[in-house]
Amino acid sequence: MDSLPDAIVQYILSHFNNARDVAVCNCVSKRWKESLPYLKSLYFPRNSFDGYSGDDSPDVVVWKMLSSIACLEELVVYSPFTSSGLASWIALVHSSLKYLELRMDNITDYQACVDSPSKLDCISAAKNLESLKLWGVLMANPPKWDVFKNLESLEIVGARLEDPALSAALRACPNLTNLVLLGCEGVRSFSVELPYLEQCKLDFYGLGNCSLSLNCPKIELLEVQGCSWIRVRETTYLRKLSIANNAGRVYMVDFGKLSALESLSMRGVQWCWDAISKMLEWSSEVKHLYMKVEFTGDLESLLPFPEVDFVEFFNSHPKLQKFDIHGAMFAALCQKNSLKNIEQSFVIPCLEEVVVQVRSPLNAEQKMSTLESLLKYGKNLKTMVIRILQMKSNHSSTDDFFDEICRLRFMNRKIVRIE
């Protein structure tokens, strides 16, 4: 590198972002040290100060590095820090900082949350942020944030949140296009009104009984986990929708017309049948449908799905290209009356891929009939995957059913495979 012009050396070294690498480069030569002001991004891993024995505290070390940088745009800190340290850093780089990611480590420290200023409060000084990502957050009280006019992406991972605090945080971010809340607990009722929001991923854990109201006219992607009541009225641009509830039940869904929906995923132990049937009705334009719901029924009663007419189902979803069908939905399609009186003109026009999960030899004849019908009427079917999981039975019907599936695979070996 000695033969390279200074500008080239500075350009190369300005792409380093790991704090330890930057520190090592500063020790090589004065020429390398002069590249420090041109850094755009700086990253402090969790172990940045392991074995450190210097006189300065880690907060001061970070401050000194930041003070040498002319125009820092991205700061990522996973190593421990204090609220006073964070405040001093942001005071240095607030005018140029666009991307901030912090491991807060205060999810169980209520006192640190209520102390003033808290770590969350300190972030307010970075008024030009475009992206903010926080890990391990305790948000018991509303953060003292002014409006982040440029903030487009907010991600919070692993958090304990109170409803008023979360609502206040979102009001300070009116121009979000991307919102991600993953592994969050404490939320009971959540309302989102963001006019520019396009992508939203919400993962609430606990009892699975949250309620969600979404009013975002430009929403394109929505993933929700852990909500029992879901209302989304503006759905003109919604293309991808995923609803899951692994701990609780889905009681109610209320959506506007899903005319743009291409992908729908419904997962969970129990959904009320009214919620399932409404989602299937609204998603008539869907191209990829994933269903893994084990039971229906209201309140505590766990009931199988009512019969779903095979012909009516596919006629109601003419654009369906990929169908992942597991649990109760497959059983519902396999009931005796589902395949009666099929007209010769019936065809499944767009179906290309089917993934079926089989867990029981019960009603084996109907199940085989359904699989054969998918092959017969799916004129453009290219792949059928049959997954046999946990089929436990000492009865001979299990072996007979497995033999029938193997025969189906042999007769259609270019399309069917068993996993």
Image: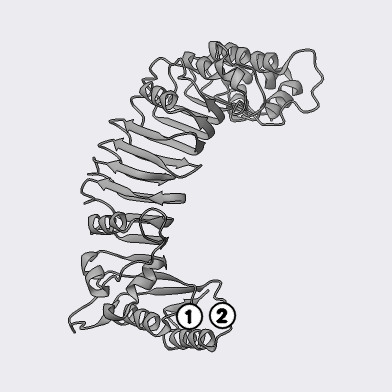
Horizontal side of residue 226 vs 51, given as left or right: left
Tag 2 and tag 1, C-beta contact below 8 Å: yes
Residue matched to label 1:
361
Rendering coords of residue 419 (x, y %): 53, 73
Residue matched to label 2:
393
Q: Which residue is drawn at 70% across and 16% down?
A: 61
Amino acid carrying mark 1 in the image: Pro
Horizontal side of residue 337 vs 148, given as left or right: left
Answer whether residue 385 is visible to the viewer in this image: yes
Horizontal side of residue 321 vs 294, given as left or right: left
Q: Residues within 10 Å of mark 2 (few under 14, many from 20)?
A: few
- Taking 376 as reference, is 125 above or below it? above
Amino acid carrying mark 2 in the image: Ser
Under circle 2, the secondary element is loop
Q: Residues within 10 Å of mark 1 (few under 14, many from 20)?
A: some
Q: Which residue is drawn at 54% across and 24% down?
A: 40
